[in-house]
Amino acid sequence: MWKLSATELAAAVRSGELGAVEVVRAHLDRIAEVNPAVNAVTRTLEQEAVAAAADIDRRRAAGERLGPLAGVPFTVKENIDVRGSATTHGVPHFRNAMAGSDAPQVRRLREADAIPIGRSNMPDMTIGGYGTTSQLFGETLNPWNSTKTPGGSSGGDGAAVAAGMAALGLGNDSGGSIRIPAMCCGITGLKASHGRLPVDHRVAGVEPTLASQLLPVDGPLARMVADLRAAFEVLAGPDPCDPLAVPAPLDGPPPPEPITVGVVSDPGGFGVHQDVRAAVEQAADALADAGYAVEEVELPRYADALTAYGKLISTEFGLSWPRIRPLLTEESAQHMELSMERMPPCSLADYVKVTGDRHGIVRDWKRFQQRYPLVVGPVSTQPVGDRDPRVSGPEEHMRSTLAISLNTVTTLVGVPAVAVPTGVGGASPSGGVPRGVQVIGGHFREDLCLAAAAEIERRFGTVTPVTPDWKGEQA
């Protein structure tokens, strides 16, 4: 059962072909089998999950209508509230921070009869670099290759879904934190438009400041694009918990055909690995064969977007850093300290100017996307990296940051993107690693992103679930 997709599981539970309890128990068994090697699930929610599944089976037997994700097990990142479970953010300070209610995304999945089965690992406070290592739970490994990173910061969800421990994962993305683990682990991930999915990113009751309102989004990870679409339909829409979420339609008006796709292999011109370039070109070829018009492009105001993002983040983190820094280790603080060293917090006048700069950048992107409703590009311009997330200094940190800069720019602009695998390559004695691209759309055009990603998936197929074949290495 753990090999089935979310939509397959839900259909089988609704029809009575499978019981929700047996689905949950099969995934709990899978967690017990492979999590000691991968360390993606920080703790199971076994008792609650089995009880929820039993209720679903009871309701089906009584002839009641079940939700669209009936019986589908999902993991939840350690910074998203699940009622009755601590929202630890991976650090000892929040070890006992019990959530009294579900975050909007968890509540909506529950209302669709999906079942939270476990919490998933993340780096300390999401800012511990490009891997997934936390003080409370240790290091998560990539189920494809124990020497490679699973990505971050939603690396626990990426590894759990890729290894068959859950059919869906619920993470968040403020600069690639869903898309990077999706690429590293060979699965799909949706970074939705700003305002599309309701979120509640308060930490210990403190309201998020402007950048934390505009940039991070919660969203699903899955093994198939169809599962992303199913989760997206459940998660989208306004909610009283999030005043910025809007009731936009799930599908926008059909654009003129053929839909023009802009292709960018080396965003920003910082350099791209030949394997990554090949993956982008192959994805573009798949779309061309499916009837899309494909053109190479340069993205608008790329350097300006990177600067604006850096100034917003560093200025707001600079204000809260005295409170956050004591919660972190030297290693987990390194990424943010190097970021603020490269882009120091700015004055109030400069910060206010940056908010205006962002507005202009968004306007120019909207103009660009009138001609190019979709863009295909890399999640990272470098292949899946080694598992050690530490960097040697500012130059290496800069290279790592620029490699994933397309995620940063699209986050600043607030547009949606879907990460989708394009196969597995780079075989070594420790095993190969996945390759993938992202499909970027206009604001609230997740429908176009998902449709194009499905065409890419049709060409390359799915590559998960995967079973780790090395001995467990608990960090």
Image (spheres, grey):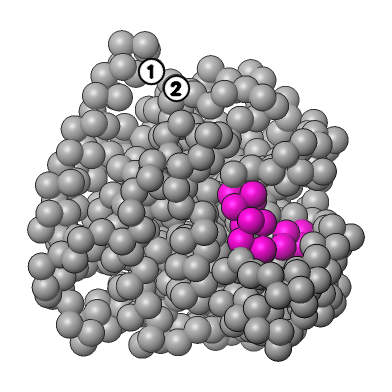
* Residue 346's disc number: 1
Crowd around label 2: few <14 · some 14–19 · many ≥20 (10 Å): many
Residue 125 picture quarter? top right
Left or right: where does residue 262 sit relative to residue 79?
Answer: left
Q: Tell me the crowding category of disc 1: few under 14, some 14 to 19, or many 20 or more residues within 10 angstroms, Cα based.
A: some
x and y percentages locating residue 145 in the rendered image: 65, 75
Mark with earlier residue (2, 1): 2
Q: Is residue 331 above or below residue 279?
A: above
Q: Which of 461/392 is in front?
A: 461
Identity of the residue drawn at 10% across and 67% down: 256
- Residue at horizontal 47%, vertical 60%? 232
Q: Is mark 1 on a helix, strand or loop?
A: loop
What's the distance in space between the residues labelled 2 and 1, CA to CA? 6 Å
Magenta segment: 105-118
Q: 387 or 348: which is nearer to us? A: 348
Residue at the spot x=76%, y=73% of the render? 62
Residue 171 appears at what percent x and percent y? 58, 53
Q: Name the residue under label 2.
A: 315
Does residue 360 sit above or below 271 in this rendering?
A: above
Residue 238 horizontal side relative to residue 23, left or right: left
Residue 196 in picture, x, y percent from top left: 41, 47
The reply to whether the C-beta atoms of the residues labelled 2 and 1 are less than 8 Å apart is yes
